[in-house]
Image (cartoon, rainbow, N blue to C red):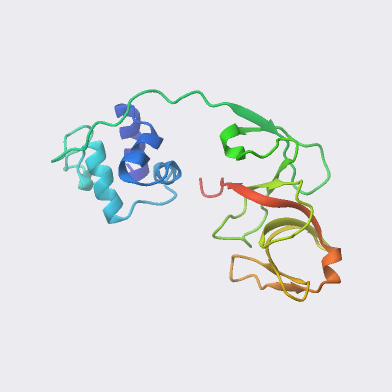
Amino acid sequence: MTFGSRLKRLLREKKIRQKALAESIGCTAQTISFWTTGRNEPRPQQLAKLARALGVDEAWLKGDEDAKGGGAKAENPAPELPLEPEPPVELAEIPFAEGTPGDPLPLRIPSGTLRGLGEETLRLYLSRDESMLPTFGRGDVVAGDTSCRRATSDGIYVLRGPRGTIIRRVQLLPTGGARLLSDNPHYPPLDVTSEDRKRFEVLARAEFVLRFSGL
């Protein structure tokens, strides 16, 4: 059984919410999610906190079948975590766009993720390459605010250029031009003059990422 499978089993058996566990050990719920899906594993210090919070042995979490686990109490266990069920999540339906012609597809996500953005201006763009790793990669979805149609400050933007739709980090230059940067060092930057900037249409400013790659 993998580490992620063990952790997922414990959460299910003890009826502990990922958010509650995250708060008890000082990390984010997304980090707990990554652990349960096998995307990554905790560092030694995090593992110690995790074992204490769950009342099991660190060695058992790491795969030692002879160690205490599956509900065995560790020394100096942490206070019990909240066991109340997950609160109901209000969902908002927003269009989905890939930067290519076609009808938008509905996608339902928690409205709390919208960060106050209007649903009428929010669009989702599918990342098709690895140019922005490690920020996001192929298969991840970038949520963009389409009310922002000009790059007036540095940030990540969805751009339509001579070679199609791209998602890049835009760094404005004193000359009036811009540098299009990829977070992946294997992709070279592109310097665009103030005149050439007209060839790139700003479709949206990236606001947050829905990560699906590696899950």
Percent across and percent down for residue 73 are 16, 35
Residue 110 visible within the image: no
* Residue positioned 62% across, 60% down in the render: 130
Residue 159 drawn above or below residue 98: below
Which residue is at the front of the view, 183 or 202? 202
Q: Is residue 95 left or right of residue 208?
A: right
Residue 210 visible within the image: yes
Percent across and percent down for residue 72 are 17, 34
Q: Is residue 45 left or right of residue 74?
A: right
How many numbered marks does the figure carry?
A: 0
Extreme residue in the bottom direction: 175
Q: Is residue 69 left or right of residue 188?
A: left
Q: Quadrant of the N terminus?
A: top left
Residue 43 drawn above or below residue 56: below
* Residue positioned 75% across, 40% down in the render: 121
Percent across and percent down for residue 152 are 74, 60
Q: Is residue 76 left or right of residue 184?
A: left
Which residue is at the front of the view, 167 or 214? 167
Q: Quadrant of residue 133?
A: bottom right
Percent across and percent down for residue 204 are 74, 51
Which residue is at the front of the view, 26 or 181? 26
